[in-house]
Each structure stands twice: as C-alpha cells, then as structure tokens.
Amino acid sequence: MDKKISGLLEKLAQIEKELEMAMASDVMEKQKDFRYRIEKKKILFEEEMKRVNREMRQGMFAFLVSTPIMSLLVAPVIYSLYIPLGLLDLWIGLYQAVCFRAYNIPRVRRSDYIVLDRGGLPYLNAIEQFNCNYCGYANGLVAYAREVASRTEQYFCPIKHARKILGTHDRYRNFFDFGDGERYRKELDRLREELRKNGKVGLEK
C-alpha cells in the first residue's frame, strides 16, 4: 500500500478510536441529563422522569387521526418486510453455524447489532414503540448481515474493485488492489489468519 495512504489510514483509525471514546462519554452524560440507567441491558428511568415522559405520550386515537391517510395505506407494505427480514435473520444464523464453523471464522454476535431498546420509551404510544422496534430490527439486521458478508469477503475474495464504489465496509480498505495478483497469492493466507484470530484485519504495511 502507498505510504501516504497507509499513514492516512492510521490517522483515520486513531480518529475513529477517539470518536468512539467521545461518543461513549456523551452517552454517559445523556443518561444523567435524562435520568435513566442501564442494568443488565434494561433501561430504567427515574420515577419522576418516567411520569414526565408519560405525560408527553400521544394517545392512540389522536395519533391515528393525525396520521396522513397515505401513511396508513402503505403501512401493510412496510410491515410486510418483516417476512423477508425474518427469513434473512434465520438464514444468517444457519450460515454462520455451518460455514463460519467449517472455516474457523469467528461468528458475529447478533446482539451487537440488533438492539430494541427504543420500543420501551415512556413518551411513545404502542404504535410508535412498534415502529421504533421495526426500524431498530431492520437496520440492525442489515448491519449484522453486512458484517457477516464482509468477513466472508475477507476470507474468500479480499480484492478491491476496479472502480470506486459507495458504502464500502471497514475491511475493504485493507483488501488487495485490483490486478495485484502477486500480493493476492502471497498474502491471502495472512488475511485469513488475522480473521480467524480476532475477526479483524490489520492495516497493511
């Protein structure tokens, strides 16, 4: 890899680490501001804050009346996505259990990506809670599937595309350049071994 690009990637990795620390600190501050705590993955609001939140909850009838008719009409189509999402969820679990185990690739923890905590917010009515869980599940599942796919790509085909593509995963920047068959043959085993050890890929030297 070009030294300039390698240096920039190292700086980016450091910035990402600092950003994660800053965001974690911000979350702690928000817990104090909005008076809740997390115990064994459960969100617990202080009683007074829970009461205030409940007062802001919109009733189901008022919510439905204020919802545009078009939103109500397309709702069945939106919720129907639960069927393919559920099938994808089941298939990813099977895929990891069979394929990742066969190649000794660390399995991706589903709970790291799919989090349904917003559905319990006291200021949301039942429909809003359901919608929040829907979005949390759908987006979390896609992120979960992406990580499984990226580990698969690192193992079988860690080669960059010839042209620029949008939305690449974190592993992609460390893949071999398109057309560099020599490095692919020499270092493929190294990337596979790094994946087996910790599920990650280190920066190229």
Image: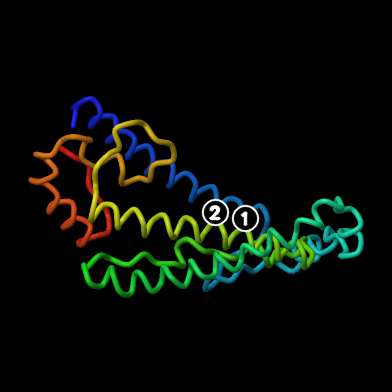
In the structure shown, which secondary structural element does the residue marked by tag 1 occupy? helix
Residue at the (29%, 39%) spot, across then down: 173
Left or right, residue 64 beside residue 148: right
Residue at the (18%, 32%) spot, across then down: 1
Query: For the C terminus, which image quadrant?
Result: top left
What's the amino acid at mark 2?
Answer: Met
Q: Nearer the viewer, residue 118 or 30?
A: 118
Badge 1, how many Cα within 10 Å: few under 14, some, many 20+? few
Residue labelled with disc 1: 32
- Residue farthest along the top direction in this orientation: 4
Left or right, residue 129 beside residue 195: right
Residue 32, image x, y percentages = 62, 55
Is disc 2 in contact with disc 1, using a CB cutoff of under 8 Å? yes
Total labels drawn: 2
Residue 139, image x, y percentages = 55, 56
What's the amino acid at mark 1?
Answer: Lys
Residue at the (92%, 57%) spot, across then down: 65
In the structure shown, which secondary structural element does the residue marked by tag 2 occupy? helix
Coloured how?
rainbow
Q: Is residue 3 above or below residue 20?
A: above
Q: Nearer the viewer, residue 4 or 96?
A: 96
Residue 21, image x, y percentages = 43, 47
**Residue 28 badge:** 2
